[in-house]
Image (spheres, coloured by chain):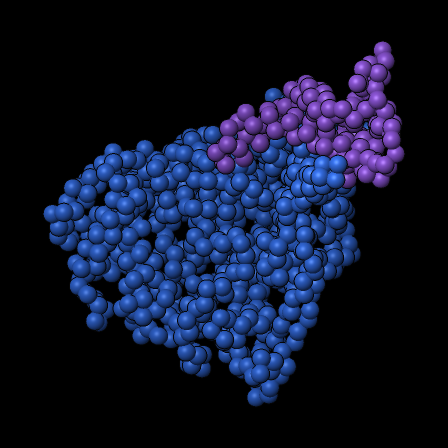
Amino acid sequence: MIAALALGMGWILATCYKYQPFNSVGALLTFRSGLLHVSYKEDAVQQGEALYKPEIHVDGSGVPHIYGKTDKDVSFGLGYMHARDRYFQMEMMTRTVQGTLSEFCGARTFSLDSFWRPYEFEKESKILLDEYKSAAPEFYSYLLAYSEGVNAFLNSNISFDPLYTIFGETPQPWKPEYSLMVTWYMSWSLSYFDHHIAQNELLTKLPADVFNYFYPLQPGGLIPILPSGKKTEVRLSKDLTGIPGVKKSSDNERISPFEFSEGIGSNNWALNPAKTKSGISILANDPHLYLTFPEAFYEAHMVSPGLNIYGFSIPGLPVIVSGHNDLAAWGITNGEWDLVDRYQLKVRNDSLYLYHNNWVPIEHKNYSIKVKGGSERLIRAENSIQGKVIREQDGLYYAQHWYAADKSYSAKAIYDLMQCRNWEEFKTALKGYGYPPQNFIYSDVEGNIGMVCAGNLPDRIAGYKGQLLDGTLEYKPVSTVDSQWYNYNPAKGYLFSANQQPIQNGFYFGAYQGEDDYRVRRINTLLQGKSDWNLQDIEKMQSDNVDLSYFMFEELITKFQVPANHKELVGKLADWAGDMQATSNQALLYEAFHWSAGMEAEKFANKYLKVERPPSLLNFLNYLNDDSYIVPDSPPKQELFLDILNKADSAIQRVIGPKWKTATYSDLSAISIENISFIPGFGEKVQDVGGNSNTINMNTHFFHPVFRAVYEMKKGNIKGYSIIAGGQSGKINSSHYTDQLSLWKNGKYKETQFSATPSGLRNITNLIIFR
Amino acid sequence: MKKIINYWPYGLALLPQFIFADYSWVIISVVAIGMISTRFIGARNVFWKMFIIELILFSLFFFIVRDRLFYVKGVLKYFEMPEFLLLLVPPVFNALNTAVLFCVGRELVGITLGGKKGYFRKTRNEI
């Protein structure tokens, strides 16, 4: 009897045990507390009761068309739909910025919370919301209505995301200030780059001519976003060169489990009527981000007497960041501006730093972080006058100032932008835009096109090149530049951006020299070379897989002697056009050369330039092809070229093996898209994807186009086509979880519906009304 | 009719998981039902009777709502496990779990009042 009871108790313990951060097996497999209770079916018509009365028509792709009598009605409706389809994602985002993710996810997100908590963004967001209450009451009430909508869904008892059941949690209520946290979250994703230690090494170790050759800040031949006047070469101030180059430690870049180490690859462009077949301007946008299910954006259509907008919102924030109203369209790419300064500190006894000839105590504050399934942990955040104190593994101390941690009015700026009727209103709205800096493309029904590179650029000292700053000198807070960079109706008839340097002038925007600009050149070449673009051509262009770096490589093949043992391999690339299609054998082989050239550039930097950061592939291939210059004590270029061939050959043999003559790029280019919870099995492996890190349709390990959209801006009849990577819903049990994935993979689109009245809509599968 | 009455605790033990959203209450309820059942049903083959009854009932129920777990197929595929586990595991687990909890209740009563002869009721058809 006792043995039976002991067995039974053992069973209870095993089934009740929580394998953190997940719920217990017993809870998950039992009906009411478990996954079987979470229904995925929704009634065709749903009714609710609320203060606001939007009418929401959800189409066959899961896109809500929200109609209301006031702006607040539609804001409420968008909140309701965001919560219905993406609340888990919204809560993850909010908890990230609050620094409370470990309460939900357990110890695996502790380092992320340790990064975020000391910024105290929850408190800051409340202050910002209060500011809006008096300074922008209309926007304030718009945010409040959105929050009501989110909570209306959460309180509706309609089945929610099974991920909550899996984690054994319930959704936390939404607060209006949470919407303002999106700005910081996106700024972190898009602007928290700190390459200053590596940059400082380049600046201090390399002679000026070598630096300018391999790492030029203002390179000739660059195609910036905006036309530049006379090229101004910035010079490094003498008093800032005294800090020696230091070796970068491994964890100083980003304290995060979601490494963005591969660069980003968003594109947008606009063509004026002279460049299109129909004589109507066209705008295209395809942001590339770290892709998960669900992806970062949510498609929606909002109609009220004051608004008629279609496009892509970020769940948590009731604005359309890329889309169009009935007069103008806009799209975004990341500005890639350098918003981080790093100061080298002199520290004594781990507690005092030398500042202005005095030893000043390092300020510190303790934070308590709750960890699910564990005890509370204390962290100690240290600050100097310049910013957050970081101690690297090599024992050196730095202070880091992240400008985007400051208050920003970006949400309000995009709210104003959504309502713009013309270029002037568009430009004016973006004057209030702060972080993260974005390149906003513009097009309207009158045939005008424009580009605004918007954001707060730190007004740093003259001659700044991204080097380390001296923390012992007097700190002068850096304000932001009070000017706006834009271009409007250029004679060439088109404008585009692809994360490149916005403009060549005296300002330091960032250290762009490490990035290849093949994508920039490809877009420019294509847009320049044709004057009868139509929507289908633009759609094809967004899926363009041509890697221009191949043509530089091809020159090297002609220039140098290819040894007999590599001739067959190299010969396979003859007559190839650089198209990185999934079905191509040459694409597979070239990717091996591309990879090995990158490795060789890194080796060259480490061994012969004696620096850690490699030159860009473009600059390295240019060097190999240049007969006029050789780095002293470096091997002949033929030898470097042979190394590339050898490495590529052995990589092909190792990875592909004897099938290399028939294998295709799809063997290498398949991508795995994870669910946002990173629980194995809820993602998808996508085969037959083309492109690489140099193509318009960028394909890297993590970065992919999260949506593609094109709009033809005909007055009174705007045509739009769009596709998102995955689906509208973040719920793993929804039919809209990955329903657009196949179209996305194949470069296909769905036609958008931009009807001012519900009667003009087609294929509506779900109607939600409020009494 | 009397036979049916003798089986009511088996049916009752199935209900808590349809009533309580908190798993702790499911455990407490089924254990309590098991304890109470000692007054009404005998000790013989209770575990297996319970397991088989629950397996039949829950399999029928699961068959109706099985679509709700379609997405779990991805997890099974990821771990290279056969898909039929999706049909097998929930009913078997629930039957086993209910039977164990039910019997734990009965054993608890048996231990605390174990010395008292005749505590477990003998059913009419029991020898």
The blue chain is A
In the depicted view, which residue is nearer to us: A57 or A430? A57
User: Which quarter of the figure is the N terminus of chain A placed in?
Assistant: top right
A67 sits to left or right of A232? right
Residue A358 shows in the view: yes
From what the image shows, is residue A289 above or below residue A125? above
A217 sits to left or right of B42? left
Residue A405 place in picture, x, y as percent: 61, 62
Residue at x-position 33% and y-position 73%: A206
Residue A334 place in picture, x, y as percent: 50, 52
Residue A67 shows in the view: no
Residue extending farthest top? B1
Residue A58 place in picture, x, y as percent: 65, 28
In the rendered image, which quarter is residue A247 located in?
bottom left
In the depicted view, which residue is nearer to us: A233 or B31? B31
Residue at x-position 54% and y-position 60%: A255
The purple chain is B
Residue at x-position 84% and y-position 36%: B114
In the depicted view, which residue is nearer to us: A391 or A128? A391
Residue A643 place in picture, x, y as percent: 22, 56
From what the image shows, is residue A539 above or below residue A437? above
